[in-house]
Amino acid sequence: MFDTILIANRGEIAARVIDTARKMGVRCVAVHSDVDADARHVAMADEALHIGGAAPADSYLRGDAIIAAAQATGAQAIHPGYGFLSENPDFVEAVEAAGLTFIGPSAKAIRAMGLKDAAKALMEEAGVPVVPGYHGAEQATDHLAAQAEKIGYPVLIKAVAGGGGKGMRLVERAGDFADALESARSEAAKAFGNDAVLIEKFIEHPRHIEVQVFGDGANAVHLFERDCSLQRRHQKVIEEAPAPGMTDEVRAAMGAAAVRAAEAIGYSGAGTVEFIVDGSGGLRADGFWFMEMNTRLQVEHPVTEAITGVDLVEWQLRVASGEALPARQEDLAITGHAFEARLYAEDVPKGFLPATGTLTHLRFPPGARADTGVRAGDEISPFYDPMIAKLVTHGPTRDVALRRLATALSQTQVAGTVTNLAFLGALARHEGFAAGEVDTGLIARDLDALVVTPAPGARETALAGLAALGLLGAEGRDIGFALWARSARTLILRRDEEDITLRVRVLSADASDVTVDETTVEARRVGGRWRLDDHVAPEVAVTGDTVTVFAQYGIEFGIVDPLIRAAAAGADSAVIEAPMPGLVKAMHAEAGQAVSAGDRLAVLEAMKMEHSLLAPRDGIVAEVLAQAGAQVAAGAALIRLEEED
């Protein structure tokens, strides 16, 4: 076994690897960028080295700096985590050339699965079923359009070097093909440096089921399946293991196909074989097809660990250090059911826009596994994926595990940035999902109901007002009462761009009446706990001019400063602003140009994705305030329209 390893990654996966390595008595070295100097994974490591600037290209993608850090600290091996350099065969070869061990598959295996078209051809040779489609080298637009017609619409355009939904477009009719192809190529070139695409038949009622495999370079086993069908924009949201509705026959067929795929390339370490499954008539042994193989540990690996009792990172370290597979296929079994929900800093009502901010408050509930790379006080940076945590629950049955997930989400507390917590909670309580009616279109079909913003009631609003006024202090403290006794105060809170006026009458240090609109809430402290109209009050956090009440997955109120309100009263609604920090990728507007509501005026690149900024109304462009290539802050004015008559 290694004495020291270096983790060539950041965030929750770096912390996850350190957790297991520490239990095995292995010393851990972390690397970090400028903005990650105080990150959680850095604090956890035995030693940490700075490797460059905030942008991944200046730090976590610098293979030479990472290898030099490993050599300088006496590390014998490098764990890549996932993302960044984890599936870069050139990096693997450089690691090995430096006399170090790469904790993962060989460069040859990564290359074999690195391009989707070549991987599908290899899988066909290995007897693994593949989706009908075009995987050829000819990339002329007319040729690809003809192939799409031959396959039959709807089709998927996919980047051959893709992943994470980037460079992927669904095309439902021939007239949309050319625009979708151009968009997919542009995104693929940006993300992967390769604009080549393949075309596949789109399965109308698809399920995304993947099989966890593990090999030692000669032999492989599978650790059963995960269902990752709950997706939006081809990004996984909630994963589970095992797959609902799975039969022993189909599990055996999929597992055998996944093992054939792994052994065909001499796979070593943890990997995932992903299948697209026709879910229209129940799972069938002839109804699944190979999509791709991820030659690394997957984000959703904890659900497999939960149902098998296997620590996959421990297996990675053991096999990379020269041990044989830790278990035979017949030694592995499924116990219970598990779910994982991905908690992100993102604005769901605004189209799941990635968000930034400082986590002023962060608390996870007991009884759930929370894999996280952040703590209260940490910043969600615009430079990296905005994941806050992965919440994992396990139970003896699917129903119990899902109920535990719903409870864990309702008890998770986050303040300082918008999140998808309420969205995840709505999914966990979705009747169809609870019944096992899972496919990749579920979120899109029910999106309007799933993204409803929690509406605060009078009690939650009253509690926010008391917190904003500092009246929820320690029991018996009479400072507040001395200041407020026999007085009333009017307070304005801001919620969803609307003002809420509260009138607060303080009766004692332990009693106040708060009127919200026409409803009066009695707030009383009894036995050290505040009660609102005899209901136990939820927890609350105040940071600056923001109050967060931890009910309904977190309800945030702004504390209105009258002076700031007056200054903002003249804000120009005709200005199109950047909704988040990012790079102006393209500017499609010119001064004097006539535009219609919904026209794309600019493209902002942020959080590894492109976001179109649309005209809010018909009008004339008065002024373009930013140019392509400019790095802009959230709220920066980009385009101004002429005033309406």
Image (cartoon, grey):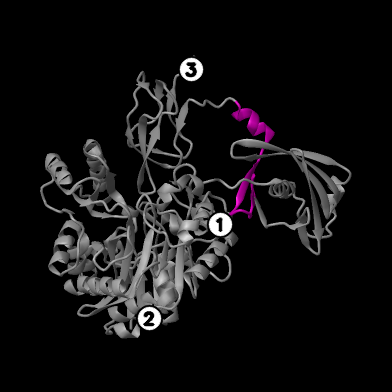
Q: Which residue is mark 3?
A: 644
Q: Earlier in the sequence, mark 1 or mark 2?
A: 2
In this view, which residue lies farthest toward the right?
486
Q: CA distance from mark 3 to mark 1?
A: 44 Å
Identify the image quadrant of the N terminus. bottom left
Of 282 and 400, the residue lying toward us = 282
In the image, is residue 108 above or below residue 443? below
Q: Which residues are magenta?
A: 543-569
Q: Pick whichever, 35 or 148, lies toward us.
A: 148
Category of crowding for the residue at label 3, using alpha-carbon neighbours closer than 10 angstroms: few (below 14), some (14–19), many (at least 20):
few
Residue 505 left/right relative to 401: right
In the rendering, at what x and y percent does residue 421 appear? 52, 54
How packed mark 2 is, by other alpha carbons closer than 10 Å (few <14, some 14-19, many 20 or more), is: few
Q: Amino acid at mark 1?
A: Gly
Specify which label sits upstream in the sequence, 3 or 1.
1
Q: Amino acid at mark 3?
A: Glu
At a point 12% along the width and 52% down the height, the residue shown is 136
Q: Amino acid at mark 2?
A: Ala
Q: Which residue is mark 1?
A: 377
In front of the other: label 1 or label 2?
2
Assign a secondary structure to mark 3. Answer: loop
- Residue 478 x, y percent position in the rendering: 85, 55
Residue indicated by mark 2 = 333
Residue 369 in view of the camera = no
